[in-house]
Image (spheres, rainbow, N blue to C red):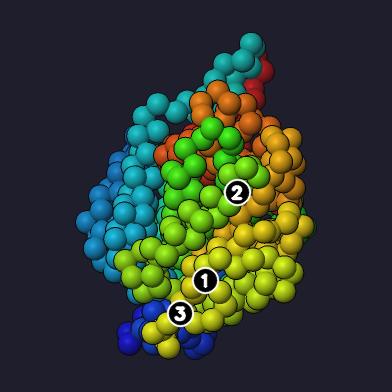
Amino acid sequence: MKAYDGMYIDGAWRPAAGDERIEVVNPADEQVIATVPAGTAQDVDEAVRAARAAFPGWAATAPAERAARITALRDALAARREEIAGTVSAELGAPPAFSRAVHADLPVAVAGSYAELLGSHEFEEKIGNSTVFHEPVGVVGAITPWNYPLHQIVAKAAPAFAAGCTVVLKPAEDTPLVARLFAEAVHEAGFPAGVFNLVTGRGPVAGQALAGHEGVDLVSFTGSTAVGRQIAATAGAAVKRVALELGGKSANVILPGADLAKAVNVGIANVFSNAGQTCSAWTRMLVHTEQYDEAVALAATAAAKYVPGGDRLGPVVSARQRDRVRGYIRRGIEEGARLVAGGPDAPEGRSTGYYIRPTVFADVTPGMTIAQEEIFGPVICVIRYEDEADALRIANGTVYGLAGAVWAADEATATAFARRMDTGQVDINGGRFNPLAPFGGYKDSGIGRELGAHGLTEYLHTKSLQF
């Protein structure tokens, strides 16, 4: 076990203000692998002051110079690929191949996209007799989740840097180690002192202090809708801007005529990747009544390929999360859903580790708890619909609206259905993830957008001068 010391503040590692430590547990074997300082309000205050002092100089830096620093950051992250992947596998439990491809490589691509975007983005425009300027918001308080720990850091910090903002990061307490690697990469990339600052700590202490700090101009948070509401209330009291990427209960709608086998198999992979800990996962599979039994059989067969502890399915992040997911599985059984794969018991041969059996429910009705609430584990609900109107009603029938998928015999039919879905992002017939496209939700899934040019605008003020 390694004991990490200090917070990264004003370009250097500084001792933490308090003595409390956070234990980092490997969810695969339940062993403590490291400890980090539990930050206090004093640590947050020092970090915000450093970011505040660095802001004028960084905001005045030419976009080309900001792009050069972000490019250097991208390269520093790429050079740490294996260390990043190994760290995420250890603190989150993700299988090594998934850690390399998603947890390590995707953040590199996102960072690079913002360096490229600065080469073409216009921070000034003419509208009639007005000149409109797009200026950096100021100090950003970034509060990131444990499920995609480095990706979410980069998805907030990279556009903030590109806009000319400075950043104070409070990462999730379950996965703080990769955030330290990010701080090392920022330092190596040559960012001026204070442009990026890291405070590890617990949400109710460090997170709340950051969200409410008078020196923070914008709070960017990814996590649960319940915590998002608390952060929005805290920030709103100070008339502070917020960007919230929250929960989801996304629908995977398979229309008649679609390639059923492909739609089901891709849908299962989408939900079970990252042990189901993905806010945009298509956790509700909607199938026409005439194809329903076939789809359920295909889903059960596909689920059998995901062996807990194998190369596709790791544990969930913590004992608390394991118990939460198992509780939802039991609730589904109690409410009358039919279990066709998995279940609430520990996987065979896995007496240690926070593993969940990959679970498929059939005969799920739209009002059931498991069809309405975000479970955040490898659990999928297969829901029957009668016609397109019924499918649309079910797809839109939750408080969430983050993502989704539509499969049809042709792109036009799928697109027409997707346009009527109340959700921020929809994949058509297996469309690939695009890190340049805006990501974010409708309804209780959040406020604002991440990634690409739309993600950059979240960190900009708009000012107009009339002549």
Residue drawn at x 62%, y 26% is 416
**Residue with the mark numbered 1:** 342
Name the spot of residue 420 as percent of width and height, x first.
Answer: 68, 32
Label pair 3/2, CB-CB below 8 angstroms? no
Q: Is residue 75 visible?
A: yes
**Residue with the mark numbered 3:** 347
The quarter of the picture where the N terminus appears is bottom left
10 Å neighbourhood of mark 2: few (<14), some, or many (≥20)? some
Query: In terms of sequence position, does the residue under pointer 1 or pointer 2 come before the other?
Result: 2
Going by the numbered disc 2, the residue's amino acid type is Tyr
**Residue with the mark numbered 2:** 292
Is 105 placed left or right of 363 in the picture?
A: left
169 or 338: nearer the eye?
338
10 Å neighbourhood of mark 1: few (<14), some, or many (≥20)? many
Mark 3 to mark 2 CA distance (whole Å)? 27 Å
Determine which quarter of the picture holds residue 184: bottom left
Name the spot of residue 278 as percent of width and height, x first.
Answer: 51, 58
Name the spot of residue 146 as percent of width and height, x first.
Answer: 49, 66
- Secondary structure of the residue carrying tag 1 is strand
- Secondary structure of the residue carrying tag 2 is helix
